Image (cartoon, rainbow, N blue to C red):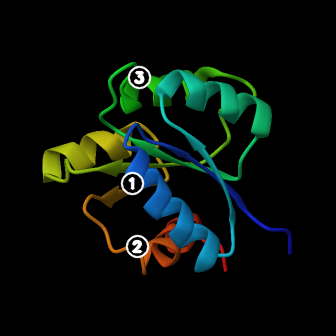
Amino acid sequence: MTTKRILIIDDEKNLCTVIGASLEKIGRWQVLTASSGIDGLKKAETEQPDAILLDVMMPDIDGLALLEKLQSHVVTKKIPVILLTAKVQKVDLERFTKLGVAGVIAKPFDPLTLSYLIANILKWS
């Protein structure tokens, strides 16, 4: 089985570091990071990751607007996207589900179980 590649798109540099270390050490996946929505879109197009972890609230382009761009681009539309968000009210979760995301992971999360959550959402064994 080939190593999975995950793109993290989040403007919080420290959080990207924690997520990246967790996914590399525990999940044994290759991690790519982008600190802005614009950079994330470019990396998704050129790197073709197996999945994207996308922060909902970012300054340049918010995660939901970026999700729409990813879903409308022929090269990135089939890449599963998991949202990272502190917005986990029932109404928010229903809205996210209707947008066609693979899943939602609530912030804060446990870095020790993050790769398990992602593998479970994406049905990676």
Q: Give the residue type that dot 1 points to.
A: Leu
Identify the residue under disc 3.
65
| Residue 32 image position (x, y, % from top left) | 65, 48
Residue 37 in the image: above or below residue 22: above
The residue type indicated by label 3 comes to Ala
Quadrant for the C terminus in the image: bottom right
Residue placed under numbered mark 2 in the picture: 111
Examine the rendering and report whether any part of residue 54 can be seen.
yes
Q: Nearer the viewer, residue 5 or 65?
A: 5
**In this rendering, is residue 11 above or below 42?**
below
Identify the secondary structure beneath mark 2: loop
Residue shown at 15% from the left, 53% from the top? 90
Can you tell which quarter of the image residue 60 is in?
top left
Residue drawn at (57%, 72%) of the image: 119
Of circles 3 and 1, which is in front? 1
How far apart marks 1 and 2 lie (CA) works out to 10 Å
Q: Earlier in the sequence, mark 1 or mark 2?
A: 1
Which label belongs to residue 15?
Answer: 1
Return the x and y of residue 51 as percentages of the image width and height. Answer: 62, 52
